[in-house]
Structures are given as structure tokens and as C-alpha cells.
Amino acid sequence: MITAAARALAAGDPIGALNRISLRDDAPALALRGIAMAQLGDLARAKDLVRRAQRAFGPKEAVARARCVVAEAEIALVSRDLAWPTQALDAARATLDSHGDRVNAAHAGYLEVRRLVLIGRLDDAERILAGLDASALPPALQAAHALAAAGVAMRHVRARAAREALARAAQAASRAGIPALSAEVEAASQALDTPAARVVSQGGERPLLLEDVESLLASKALVVDACRLVVREGGTSVSLVSRPVLFMLARALAEAWPGDATRDALVARAFRGKVADESYRARLRVEVGRLRAELRPLADLRATRQGFALVPRHAREVFVLARPVEEKYAAVLALLADGESWSTSALSLALAASQRNVQRALDVLATDGKVQAVGRGRARRWMTPPVPGFATALLLPAPLPSD
């Protein structure tokens, strides 16, 4: 019965598995029941069952205990408990690998890759993924490998690599015969046909697919990237992530190019002032001087009668690359729009922001009816329906403003 239940779970049939083991409380049955409940969406019950199973296995059953750790790590990932101790997953993966359980060891690796992608550590995710050989794995894990590769490629803005990985994932999912896995691949594929950004230039704007974003970033144009707070041209880039005022000035100047931006417009964008009085003018001169020093490799800032103008040194065109949906807390919405429930601690980790700033953002969004909370206390989670026009898989989290 245990073997039959395990096969049912591997085929994506949790109900069939529970029909065989729902009344059993031995360690293997508890573990399989936990996995079945996770597949059915009852994550709290699943976590409890997996932990009970881990305690029920004896100290000599190292492989079984390691598999329980991997199952708990997957439940934590789906629950967006990103602070779950990854050291336990690393130890479980090493145990499985040393005992010849290559399949579950690889599964543990893919869980770590998915977590790293969520928090924006793409280089680490790519390094782990490169060390995993999917050729000898079952079709379901081959699909998981290809999905992870596609996720990394999309966030690195490599459209062709992402489409190739998704094609491999679709073929593997078809061989696996698991409907939920095929649906996951289909959802990921749809993201590539959803606008990933907007381009703003000379008073107009238009949506861009990922291929268009890749082409724009590879061009010789000067791009003010409002998704990552970077100004770039070809292989040269200047990060303004920690200089929000300078970035707002750079964006305002780029949007006004080839003309100039008035002092009143710059003061309104950067300082939220209404009129450029002498105090604001003095502050503006200081900040423009700082921005001029930062952008020296790429462009110059020249004073005009009305304000300032951006003058590229080499580029013939200037574009602003913006999010498809923009508002003050767009980064929070981008994470919540995946349909999963997030804790404030997980959002804080993914956004590299303090929990206080995240909670402030959530309170504002909840007041506007854009997010909703479920549960209380430490079990409180935040979620929202998908936002139309939002290619969430393509957006890297940006730091929240201090206020």
C-alpha cells in the first residue's frame, strides 16, 4: 500500500494516495500523507504530518529523515516561508547524495534554486543549476530543471534561452503525464507573451515583450532602467539604486530628451515641491552636480534657460524602461501577484527592505483594496489576485523607499 501510494503521488494523484494510507500512522504513511496534503493545498496540515514523520523515523533511517526535510522545505517554499533554515536542506541534500538517492538530492537542489530566484540571487541560482545534471532524472524533475532554467533566464532578460528552456519543460511535462506540471509550464510560457515593461521616449510610450527588452538593452541607446534603477548604454552601466533622488532626476531628464526639463518639473519629480523657489533651486543645483558626476561616462547635463538637458556622449537615442504597472509599492504587488500567500518577513527578505517598511506598504495597499490579509499574528499572510498586464516573473524586486 505504501508503494502504491508513493506511485500515486509521483503521478500527481494525491486523492488516490490518501485512499490507501489515510488511516495509517506509521512513519512512511505520515510522510506520504503530508506530501498528499501539500499537493491538495492544506499546507499547515502537510507541515505537521511531515514533521511527525521525521520524528517517527529512527536515527538509523537517515535517508527517510532527509526526505522529510526536503518535503518540509518544499512546503516552506510554497508557503513563502523564505526564512526556513536552508542549512537543513543542504544537509539533507548531502545525505541523500551520499546514500545514492540522486532523484531526491536533485529535487532538493531545485528547491534551493527556486528560493534563490525568488529573492533575486540569480548568480547563486545559476551556479547551483549548472551543477545539476537532469539527463538521468525522471521526466518530472527534467521539467523542474527546465522551469528553473527558464526562470533564471527570464530574470536575466534572456528571451531566447527562456523559450528554449520552456520548450524542454513542456516536452518533459508531457512525458511525465502530470496535468498540474503541464499547467505550470503553460503558465510560465504565457509570461513570455505578456508585456514585461514599457518604453517611454519623446512623449510616447509602448509595451515591450521580453524579447523587445533584451533588444533594447543590447542596443547602443542610452537606457534609463526604472525597473532596476540603473542608467546603461551597451556594456556600461551606472547603478542609482541607493540614490533615488538622482535616479528621479535622470528619469525626468530622459523623458524630456531631446528637449530640456524645466526646473519646476525637476523639483516636482525629485523633491515633490510645487514651485522651484530659491531654496529648491540651490538644492537642485547640488543634486544635478552629483548626477553629472555619476553619469560622466555616459552623458553630460547642461543647464538651459528653463532648466537642464541630458546630452548623451555616444548614444543617438534615449529611452526610459519602466514597469508595465507603476505605483509607489509596485515591487510589493509584483511579488504578491504570483497568487501565493506571503508573510511580511518573506516579503522583507525578497525585497531587501525592513519589515516596518513592508508593513507600511501593505497597510496602504490593503486600504486601497489591492491586497488582503489572511490569519492573525505570526500566521498572518498577505495575498492578491494577479494584476492584469503584469509579467511578474520578469520583475526583479526593487528596494522600497524609506518612506
Image (cartoon, rainbow, N blue to C red):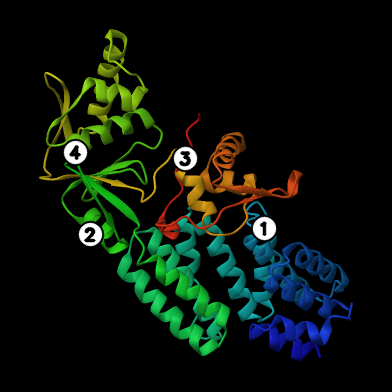
Determine whether label 3 and label 1 are within 8 Å by CB. no
Q: Earlier in the sequence, mark 4 or mark 3?
A: 4
Name the residue that disc number 1 marks: 87
Find the distance from the CA under tag 4 to the CA under tag 1.
43 Å
Q: Quadrant of the N terminus?
A: bottom right
Asked whether residue 334 is in view, the answer is yes
Name the residue that disc number 2 marks: 215
Q: Nearer the viewer, mark 4 or mark 2?
A: 2
Name the residue that disc number 4 marks: 298
Q: Nearer the viewer, mark 3 or mark 1?
A: 3
Find the distance from the CA under tag 3 to the CA under tag 2.
26 Å
SS state under label 1? helix
Tell me the amino acid under the disc marked 3: Pro
Name the residue that disc number 3 marks: 399
Q: Residue furthest top?
A: 278
Tell me the amino acid under the disc marked 4: Leu
**Viewer-side residue, 362 vs 111:** 362
| Identity of the residue drawn at 56% across and 82% down | 179
| Identity of the residue drawn at 54% across and 52% down | 336
SS state under label 2? helix
- Classed neighbour count for the residue bearing mark 3: other residues with Cα under 10 Å, few (<14), some (14–19), many (≥20): many
Q: Earlier in the sequence, mark 4 or mark 2?
A: 2
Tell me the amino acid under the disc marked 1: Gln
| Identity of the residue drawn at 42% across and 56% down | 390
Find the distance from the CA under tag 1 to the CA under tag 2.
39 Å
